[in-house]
Image (tube, rainbow, N blue to C red):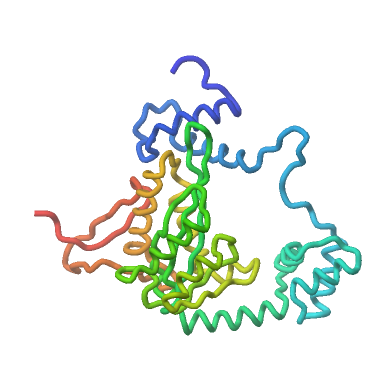
Amino acid sequence: MGGRHGTGRTRLLGGATVSKELNDFLLAAIEPTWAPGTIRKWYSDLVEAKYNSVNEGQKKRGRKPISPEIVEKVLQLAKSNPDWGYEHIAGTMRYLGYNVSTTTIRHILEANGIVPDPERRLRGDWSQFIETQQYVTASTDFAQVERLTPFGLVRESLLFFMDIGSREVCLGGIVHNPDSNWTTQIARNMCDMWDGFMLGKKYLIHDRDPLFNKRFDSVFESIGVQIKRLPPFTPQMNARMENFIRAIKTECLNKIIFTSERQLRLAVKEYLEYWNHYRPHAGLGGKMVKPYPQDMNAPVREVSFLGGLLHGYRREPMAA
């Protein structure tokens, strides 16, 4: 490639867009005009620019700073009234002439290590529920990832289901624009009478995403599953699923430039093989979800996933 490589956004768009024709597992094998890490950095910048770009005349996005006066008053109300929840504090603040939202109240209190008593009591009850019902409880949630196309970035939604007790995870589906018809069909698949993931479960946990609507819930209720819909702004109440979403993003989705849905599906399939059968889990005392049986007298074999991004190990006889 002759001439200068270009700089700034031109280089970013050019390098990232050219890479749409590449399987990222093969980046290391191409002529090293740019290092694979450089291409991935450009792609990461491209994804960030999609959501953080500011056009002329637009205000810069991001959370506005909270005035010290509001922080001081919120902390005063919370400390003087430990039984008040976020809504109660927000309502009082608005009555006093401060234009603050419930989300702002939550951010202030969490930053200062304060949890209002109603939420603290709720979490205690919830922890007891999870502890006693985990082996008959599942949860579901979305993850999102960008896919590079000739026309720009396309956001794909991935719907996962987890067995809370065992930590086993399965993929419900992948789609560009999810709607209630799609989520309802996924629910039917999960409740299949022969091999549905929800068979034997009594509870399903999910947040208040509009896609988890009455039609979605009714499919599970038809096989006797009770829906546990989480309060607003409480991802910590679905902590085990949140941990999985964080893991698949940091260990898989954020490390690959996806250029087709097929590539994305194959990567997720490999990651779930790793998660369910090879990855030790701290919450399980370092054990694996569903480890494969092995011959303890056989040599240790390394198993690679995602083109060598991840590795698992097991004892297996040498091939004859």
Q: Is residue 5 above or below residue 237?
A: above
Q: Quadrant of the N terminus?
A: top left
Q: Quadrant of residue 170?
A: bottom left
Determine whether, in the image, residue 187 is placed left or right of residue 196.
right
Q: Position of residue 121 (x, y in %)?
A: 65, 82
Q: What's the residue at 37%, 44% (across, down)?
A: 262
Q: Quadrant of the C terminus?
A: bottom left
Q: Position of residue 133 (x, y in %)?
A: 46, 82
Provide residue 93's location: percent of width, then percent of height.
85, 68
Of 191 and 60, which appears nearest the observer?
191
Which residue sits at x=57%, y=38%? 45
Q: Give the total number of marks visible in the rendering.
A: 0
Q: Provide residue 210's location: percent of width, then percent of height.
A: 59, 61
Q: Quadrant of residue 104?
A: bottom right
Nearer-the-camera pick, 88 or 105 = 88
At horizontal 46% and vertical 15% (from top left) the residue drawn is: 2
Relative height, residue 158 to residue 205 (above, below): above
Determine the residue positioned at 52% across, 74% down. Answer: 227
